[in-house]
Image (cartoon, grey):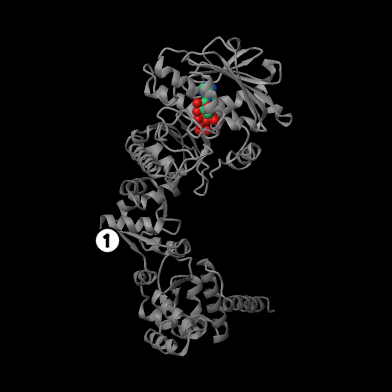
């Protein structure tokens, strides 16, 4: 024997209010949706039928109830039983169960959302198909009654009245209802009026704001869209671009933020489905890199989730995202060609997002090269400008390394680029991949050392005793001294790390930490390259360094060399190692002690 499931209406309402919809406010959307669908159905058979929805809030009806009247197709008595009184039953699907084109509803549960704010719903209707007027009265406990009486309604259409729940009266008040009707329904293709003491307030705009009027110039259109963006999204956009994706029946506009966006910000796009608002913080319409832009779109085919508050991540949405992303990118490239200054300002404001696209997109890479400011030894400038002087982009992948090497490189006439910030190294490398290996190269610190002049033999001979002291002192810090002559003269010593020596040091550390088998192998590696991992390059042109050979006794020379070393480490902004901190304390205090001796 088979039985039919019973449904506990209270339980279903609880499910809807607490788990499906984010707030009772959606009841206005569901009422508007039913009214618009009913008008669509009537106009399919009667194209000139009126298309009006009138909302009378609690204050206007004077009974505390809310009344919504539409000029739609209405319902016959049989339809009232079959469609309204059966959960999940809908007139908006075809015989095979597919959602019928042109209708907003499809699940047959929307009416239930009225019970989020009402304890009773009264629906009075007259069908365009003929027959008497019908009244359906349902209450939140799940019981309903149907009455037929010619006198209930004279016009074709439907009136829904909500009798508020004692704790939900405010949801039916004019301010709340008008605000919600405007938020959800401002773009609907019918007229929606909210009745009030001062007359009717029309909440519908008529046309989609991003469709350009016949007598509107492009400039006027852009200015109007900027005003719309300010009113709807709360910011004056840097730029506006109308977009469309015909496959998804989508039209709309992308608004570029004037500043202040962060790559980690959630995307918050305003999406309308068949001109009814889905949400104001819908995600996924633009690629992640476009975090500095917001969309307002209307779509005919993207699928809403059951709550109608988000979109399904299906293939159509992915295709739309790619297409909108490409439109934004093309717009930026065009801006770069037609209004270079504006493009430069845009890139400077949103450089992180733009750099992340440039990593995978050649056009954007060219744009970034031409417009994005980089720190270089020639000052802050775009890479294109830097390359006019230095055909090879010699870069440091680390900002500290840049700071350490830049003054010396600059004095030797070597151009350096700081590629130490997010995405910069990859970007410069990609430029090399695109245009040939000679375009970009990481500077090897030792290469800079090679560019520095060696002092004359007699000068070197004078420094020999100091250098042997320095060799001993610096060995404690895995460093070896070198004597060179270089500018700037004000710099007594420069610390340069040697990648080969660093590898050796890493291997040494690994050897100490590893098991005997590996230790043996690593030991051989370590032995192969017995170089220190750092060089302290003493500047024979610097007046302080020049006084080193004349220092009386090894003890003072030791102190000075160690101080110069620690100073050079500090200059390089590398954190001090414990042994270096100890050396700093010791040499500083010892020199102080000597300085204050009577
Ligand atoms: N104002 C109205 N005029 C005419 N018919 C209506 C009206 N309101 C509701 N109906 C009928 O009642 C049915 C059930 O409405 P309900 O809002 O519960 O679900 P739906 O609109 O079909 O789908 P969804 O759950 O997606 O909103 C509708 O399919 C429609 O046939």
* Quarter occupied by the N terminus: top right
Farthest front residue in view: 1
Q: Position of residue 234 (x, y in %)?
A: 55, 32
Residue 269 in view of the camera: yes
Q: Nearer the viewer, residue 189 or 155?
A: 155
**Quadrant into which the C terminus falls:** bottom right
Residue 34 visible, this orientation: no
542 relative position to 322: left or right: right
| Rendered position, 580 above or below 301 | below
Compare residues 396 and 355 and report the one nearer the observer. Answer: 355
Against 559, is 33 above or below?
above
Which residue occupies the extreme left position in the image?
436
Numbered marks: total: 1
In terms of secondary structure, where does tag 1 sit?
Answer: helix
Quadrant in the picture for residue 439: bottom left
Q: Badge 1 local density, few (<14 within 10 Å), some, or many (20+)?
A: few
Point out residue 172 in the picture as x, y percentages from the top left corner.
66, 25
Residue lying at 49% horizontally and 18% vertically, measured from the top left: 72
Residue 215, x across and y down, in percent: 37, 16
Vertical side of 42 occupied by 449: above or below:
below
Ligand 1 has an atom within 8 Å of the beta carbon of the residue at disc 1: no
Q: Which residue is mark 1?
A: 438
Q: Position of residue 561 (x, y in %)?
A: 52, 78
Point out the residue furthest to the right here: 166
Residue visible at 51% across and 39% down in the picture: 306
Between 133 and 246, the one lying in front of the other is 133
């Amino acid at each position: 024997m088979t039985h039919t499931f019973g449904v506990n209406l209270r339980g279903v309402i609880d499910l809807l209010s607490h788990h499906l919809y984010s707030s009772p406010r959606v009841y206005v959307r569901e009422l508007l949706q039913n009214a618009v669908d009913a008008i669509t159905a009537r106009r399919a058979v009667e194209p000139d039928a009126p298309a009006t929805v009138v909302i009378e809030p609690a204050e206007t009806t004077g009974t505390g109830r809310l009344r919504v009247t539409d000029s739609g197709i209405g319902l016959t008595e049989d339809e009232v039983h079959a469609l309204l009184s059966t959960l999940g039953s809908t007139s908006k699907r075809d015989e095979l169960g597919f959602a019928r084109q042109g209708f907003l509803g499809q699940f047959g549960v929307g009416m239930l959302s009225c019970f989020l704010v009402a304890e009773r719903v009264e629906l009075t209707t007259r069908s365009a198909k003929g027959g008497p007027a019908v009244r359906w009265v349902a209450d939140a406990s799940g019981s309903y009654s149907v009455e037929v009486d010619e006198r209930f309604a004279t016009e074709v259409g439907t009136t829904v009245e909500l009798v508020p729940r004692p704790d939900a009266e405010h949801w039916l008040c004019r301010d709340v209802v008008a605000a919600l009707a405007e938020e959800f329904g401002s773009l609907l293709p019918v007229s929606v009026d909210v009745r009030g003491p001062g007359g009717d307030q029309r909440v519908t705009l008529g046309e989609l704001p991003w469709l350009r009027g016949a007598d509107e110039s492009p400039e006027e259109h852009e200015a109007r869209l900027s005003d719309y963006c300010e009113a709807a999204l709360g910011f004056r956009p840097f730029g506006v671009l109308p977009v469309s994706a015909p496959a998804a029946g989508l039209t709309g506009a992308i608004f570029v933020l004037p500043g202040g966006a962060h790559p980690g910000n959630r995307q918050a796009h305003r999406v309308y489905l068949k001109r009814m608002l889905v949400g104001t913080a819908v995600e996924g319409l633009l690629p992640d890199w476009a975090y500095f832009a917001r969309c307002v779109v209307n779509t005919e085919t993207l699928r809403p989730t059951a709550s109608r508050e988000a979109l399904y991540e299906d293939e159509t949405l992915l295709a739309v995202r790619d297409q909108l992303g490409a439109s934004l990118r093309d717009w930026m490239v065009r801006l770069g060609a037609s209004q270079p200054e504006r493009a430069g300002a845009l890139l400077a404001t949103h450089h992180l997002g733009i750099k992340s696209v440039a990593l995978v997109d050649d056009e954007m890479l060219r744009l970034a090269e031409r417009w994005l400011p980089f720190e270089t030894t020639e000052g802050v400038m775009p890479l294109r400008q830097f390359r006019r002087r230095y055909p090879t982009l010699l870069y440091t992948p680390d900002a500290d390394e840049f700071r350490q090497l830049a003054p010396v490189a600059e004095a030797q006439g070597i151009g350096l680029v700081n590629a130490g910030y997010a995405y910069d190294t990859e970007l410069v490398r990609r430029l090399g991949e695109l245009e040939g290996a000679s375009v970009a190269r990481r500077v090897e610190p030792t290469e800079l050392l090679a560019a520095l002049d060696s002092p004359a033999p007699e000068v070197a001979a004078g420094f020999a005793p100091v250098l042997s002291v320095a060799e001993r002192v610096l060995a404690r810090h895995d460093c070896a001294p070198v004597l060179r002559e270089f500018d700037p003269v004000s710099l007594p010593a420069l610390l340069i790390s040697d990648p080969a020596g660093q590898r050796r040091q890493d291997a040494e550390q690994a050897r100490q930490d590893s098991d005997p088998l590996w230790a043996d192998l690593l030991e051989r590696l370590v032995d192969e390259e017995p170089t220190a991992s750092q060089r302290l390059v003493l500047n024979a042109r610097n007046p302080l360094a020049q006084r080193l050979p004349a220092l009386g006794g090894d003890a003072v020379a030791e102190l000075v060399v160690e101080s110069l070393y620690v100073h050079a480490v500090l200059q390089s902004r590398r954190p001090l190692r414990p042994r270096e901190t100890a050396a700093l304390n010791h040499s500083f205090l010892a020199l102080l002690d000597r300085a204050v001796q009577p």
